[in-house]
Image (cartoon, helix red, strand yellow):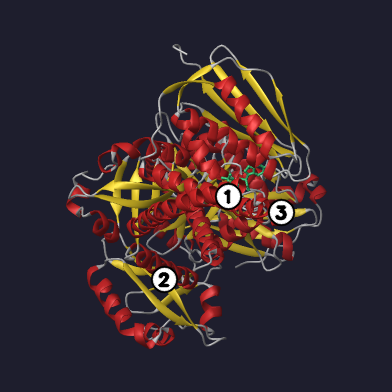
Amino acid sequence: MSNSKPIKSLTSVSHETPLTLLETYPGALFFLDEAEKIVYANTSTQTMLGVSPETLVGNSFWCNVPQLVSPSLYLAVQKTKQTRAPTEVEYVSPVTQTWLHVQLSPTVRGILVQFHKMEEPLPSREAFFPDQYHVTDILESMYVGIGFLTTEGILLDINDVPLADAQIQREEVIGKPFAETPWWSSSPTSQHQLRAAIARASRGETVRFETLVHPREGMELYLEAVIIPHKDRHHSVEYLVYVGTDITERKRAEAAIHALIDALPQLVWTGRPDGYVDSYNQRWCDYTGIATEQAQGNGWLQCIHPDDQQHILALWQDAVQNGRPYEAEQRMRQSTTGAYRWFLVRATPFKDTQGTIFKWFGTCTDIHDKKRAEQQLKESRESLRVLAETVPQFVWMVRPDGAYEYRNQRLYDYIGFELEQTPSDWQRSCQFIHPEDRDRTRELWQHALETGAMFEHEERLINAQTGVYRWFLTRALPVRDEAGQIVKWVGTSTDIEEQKRTEAALRASQERVNALMNSSIIGIFVSEDSQIVDVNDTFLRMTGYTRKDLREGGINWMQITPPEYLARTVEAYQELYTRQSMTPYEKEYICKDGSHLPVLVGAILLEHHPNQSIGFVLDNSARKELEQRKDAFISMASHELKTPLTALKMQTQLARRRLERQSLQEAATALEMVEKPVKQLERLVEELLDVSKIQAGKLEYRQEMVDLGVLLREVVETMQQTHSSHTIVVRGTLHSSLMGDRDRLGQVFTNLLSNAIKYSPGAETIEMDLRASEDAVTIRVQDHGLGIPREQCDKIFDRFYRVVGPRQRAIPGLGMGLYIVAEIVKSHGGIITVESDVGKGSTFTVTFPKREDA
Ligand code: ADP
């Protein structure tokens, strides 16, 4: 390496001598200023480069002598400028392939550069790129374009790959601004990209970009270009390295993938290794309403629910950083409705053979409906849980192996401890069952487990706090999975203690009812309208009918009631239907053997539609027989009394008359005193006789025309003569006749007047009112006496009935008069009624219909 003498000043070029000196230099020689512009070039450059020195002066060295340009030289120039020390470099010109030896000497305002052609390299030469050619060889085989650029972007060297693509020679491009070479000049976009990248790289940044270039007519090439700044020890950028990788195939594959992605039913996107999301399928854009350009990078965040954005971004960045698959559920806004729907977003990193991620592929799957269904399921599970906690029963779930899955608080409170989820639980819980119920419970459980049938059992469970057993109805049903396998049993235990008690009470009362039903005293029947639908055994025993007769509808009111009782029976049933109950009444049943059974019947109505009633029947035959015997006795006694009484009366009258004839007046008067009670006694006996005749239906009536007016006048006169205590006032007259028994009719009014006098001890008058209308004759007997309580007015016409009361009790009587009166009036076609006010008096009214022949 030879040292060159420094040239003091570039102005010295104007000096003849040095210039001549320089001109004599055999190789090409250049003065470059600080900006590496050619200030001077000697004439040898003409020989070496075929360019006149004058054309070079004032121009950039790197752009005008491509035959000399090389990265090594470029670096040597930079070094000389920096170190201000002479240096030298040897290299093969990329253009001419000739070996050059270059000496560089710093000058005051620039550098002196001298070139020598040489045959071979010197054994020890300084090389700036010791591995340059070796590396290039390797890169060549990788089909990668490599270039070296000045920080201004002048191409210092380039390998064969891009040259072959563009079908141009190296010398055509070396020393030219890289951006103006054919690769870039045909595409303004890529040219612009490159210029920007060079500018950034020269500031120290590695810049990467993808672009589409047209190296030659008809050729289209997708390049991934990287501009790498090369820095020296002081971190200042020395030169730039360009690496261009043909990614056409990849781009085409990507285009195919995009077409495929667009066809997918999901929302799909791809991302760069650094997490920059670069593409979306149409579906994604349609759903979100965001165009790919807006969504690129982190633009997609705007479709994420505001509440989730931060969290989702952090998740994504974490996945990118760690190169791990990404998976998240996120809410994404649907542009058409504005509503957020749930999506399952998954992204997988794609790696090359070295394991370097070159792409992310992401999909968004709509899981909104599934999520909602899940949510609903969760809600319904929650509702079930709440329900299980609120119902008054115990609720529990147990697995087929006996392990409890769930039991509600109520159950816990009752048994007093938490059950563990172990298969032994069920055994343990058995201890709360009453010892007498345990075996049956186990047996039924076993059966349920084997058959899958519902478990149902009433069992007693002990209350842990009180130590008292209560009855529970336990029920459980199996829950099966899709394959039909039982996965659990869901059960409830309902407290039926009260129900049990009620049932027991009901049973007892039922037993009582049954006892009543089956009592041998009372016959019971249930009837619907006129049909008897059920009876007890007593009823059957009383009447002689059988259950078969009952089933065959053989027991019917119409059939078992004798004709003479039909009217009364219908009346009784009308009362039942209107008043819901029937006053017990006497009647007879026709028994199966045709005999008549006297009975007392009462009933109450159960339902209206149909008229269902329940009734009781008492055998009245014993009472009836007693009554008959009593009647027979009265009849016999009255007959037996009548004969001696008549004899006594006759004897007394005869004796009195005899004494009167003998003028023994005193004795006659005494005898007359005896005659009066005898007469009373006689009347009593006659009444008794009348009553027994009525009972026997043997009271006979004469049939004669009776002038009522005359009859009543006579009765009143007689009464007035014998009863001077009251004045009988008669109002009105009667000119009516009646066919009947004169004496019996006279007995009616005699009795009414005598009662009126008898029961009005403090009064002075009795009024009699006679009235005749067109079709009836009415006779009223009114007194101002004691009166009759309203509720007893109906009863005074009954046999032997007397009004209950202290004042009435003091008045003698046997309660036969009105019974006979009513019977006589009835037999004459008339009716008798009474109106009375207690303490004010009573009015008896007798009405006879006027007969047409009367
Ligand atoms: P007795 O022989 O008791 O008078 P009756 O059959 O004539 O029997 O009358 C029945 C009952 O009716 C009497 O006991 C009496 O209590 C009541 N009674 C009848 N007539 C009257 C009347 N005019 N005023 C008040 N009570 C009467």
Residue highlighted by disc 2 = 508
- Please tell me how crowded label 1 is: few (under 14), some (14-19), or many (20+) other residues with Cα within 10 Å: many
Of the two numbered discs 1 and 2 on the same chain, state the one appearing first in sequence.
Answer: 2
Find disc 1 in the rendering and name its residue: 656
Q: Residue at x 69, y 45 (%)?
A: 759
Between 630 and 218, the one lying in front of the other is 630
Task: Using the image as rendered, state which of residue 188 and residue 569 is in the foreground.
Answer: 569
Are the residues flagged by discs 2 and 3 in contact, CB closer than 8 Å?
A: no
- Ligand 1 rendered quadrant: top right
Quadrant of residue 726 in the image? Answer: top right
Q: In this view, does 651 lie above or below 322?
A: above
**Local secondary structure at mark 3:** helix
At horizontal 50% and vertical 70% (from top left) the residue drawn is 498
The type of residue carrying mark 2 is Ala
Q: How crowded is mark 2: few (under 14 residues within 10 Å), some or many (20 or more)?
A: few
The image's mark for residue 807 is 3
Could you tell me residue 314's position as x and y percent? 62, 60
User: Which of the two labelled residues, at mark 2 and mark 3, occupies the earlier sequence position?
Assistant: 2
Position of residue 108 in the picture relative to residue 135 (left or right): right
Which residue extends farthest front?
662
